[in-house]
Image (cartoon, rainbow, N blue to C red):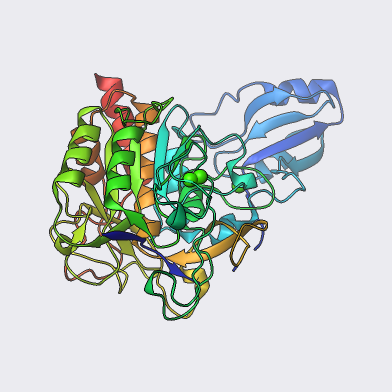
Amino acid sequence: MRFAPLAFIAALFSTTAHAEAARYIVHFADTASARAARLPSRDVHARGDRGPRHVRSLATGGEVFDLPDGNPAHLAALSGVVSVEEDVWIQPTAVVDPLWRRQWNLHDARTGVDAEVAWRRTRGAGAVVAVLDTGITPHPEFDGQLLPGFDFVSDPDNARDGDGRDPDPVDAGDWKDVGDCGAKTPRRSTWHGTHVAGIVAARAGNHPGMVGLAPEAKLLPVRVMGRCGGRLSDIADAVVWASGGAVPGVPPVTRRADVINLSLGVGGACGMSFARAIDDARSRGTVVVAAAGNDAVSANAEMPANCPGVVTVAAVARDGGAAWYSNFGERITLAAPGGSLGDRGADDIVSSVDGGERGRERPAYRWLAGTSMAAPHVSALVALMRSVDPAIDVDAVTRQLVDNARPMAGPCPRGCGAGLMDAGATVDAVYEDRARS
Ligand SMILES: [Ca+2]
Ligand SMILES: [Ca+2]
Ligand SMILES: [Ca+2]
């Protein structure tokens, strides 16, 4: 049985801006006028508290005022004023995470996951996300983000790294020539694991690039798929290992994952290997998140999406409805942005890849679509939740994901579970619950 990554293939760039008004700097002709202006006005109540409020005095002799109604005329009317200027926001001239504008999946008001609201509470510090995938490539988005992972691909021919299982989870490329694993047409390497990992935890603030939903979480890169996909036996072992369990012949993981992301699948019923591995992981407190699959059928037909205890994630298109390719139905826990897979690459999900057609060449970015891209949004959200409340258990995580999802902005006639994941609302709810307990 071979598992395939659940993404399709589909390039990128730009800048950020930020503005906020209502704070002004005033310079006065004399210190007496300045002192008088700093005093709270006696008729403050009569004006409904809408007048200038003094904030601080500056080294330049200026006085900073907040204006509740944003109207600087109040300041110009003060006696002895020689200058009124807005205390504008000034940006670093280096472009930071220039792809942010293209990351609709994180910030679009209708179809995004409300990342900035969640980031008021946490960016994932302290949490660990295991990405069981095609491995990882060296990329500036992962500087300082990676824990020591492992390569579970036991067949050297499939692994392309010259040996069986080994401690180096670097992706050797999954390009196919005609005849490779039955391929009828050649295919370039997908760098699927690097793309998925970027969605979870690409660094914030480096140049150039994008940002993951949990940019301060740590990534545990676990390689389980190679040239022809991955074996069930290798993936099941990797689930046990990443969640802190013992796997014969493999040294124990240094830090147990809070959540395991499985952006992979194949048609079929959930068998004992997956069922036991997932049970095992859950019993140690690790949440298992799986992509629903890309066959536009019931997720019941896809494993591990159909395994008990898994958080199963459908894909949302750029228009806010279910993506045409996404699996659906009562197995779905909730949905997350996965991209439209239409004519416009920008309607898909941008993340990190390597630029190499076959082997690794240089760090790059690419648009991909699939439930493979949806699942890591949810895995990153679980990391944010665990960062806010390290003790929140597996079932409470699922409950909060469901209770705080929001209605889809577009149609999903055949079932998208609780709707679109909402990182802001979910993190707020976990934070408030913890504050109460
Ligand atoms: Ca190997
Ligand atoms: Ca290796
Ligand atoms: Ca970045």
Residue in the picture at 32% in, 62% down? 315
Q: Report whether 362 appears left or right of 157.
A: right
Residue in the picture at 67% in, 48% down? 96
**In which quarter of the view is residue 382 placed?**
top left
* Residue 424 visible in the snapshot: no
Quadrant in which the C terminus is drawn:
top left
Q: Report whether 280 appears left or right of 9.
A: left
Query: Taking 412 as reference, is 144 above or below it?
Result: above
Query: Taking 414 as reference, is 229 above or below it?
Result: above
* Residue 437 visible in the snapshot: yes
Q: Position of residue 285 (x, y in %)?
A: 26, 29
Work out whether residue 88 or residue 432 is closer to the camera in this orientation and state it. 432
Residue in the picture at 41% in, 38% down? 129
Q: Position of residue 76 (x, y in %)?
A: 73, 41
**In which quarter of the view is residue 341 placed?**
bottom left
Query: Taking 184 as reference, is 134 above or below it?
Result: above
Work out whether residue 149 or residue 409 is closer to the camera in this orientation and state it. 149
Q: Position of residue 148 (x, y in %)?
A: 50, 32
Q: Position of residue 56 (x, y in %)?
A: 69, 23
Residue in the picture at 57% in, 55% down? 100
Work out whether residue 116 or residue 161 is closer to the camera in this orientation and state it. 161
Quadrant in which the N terminus is drawn:
bottom left
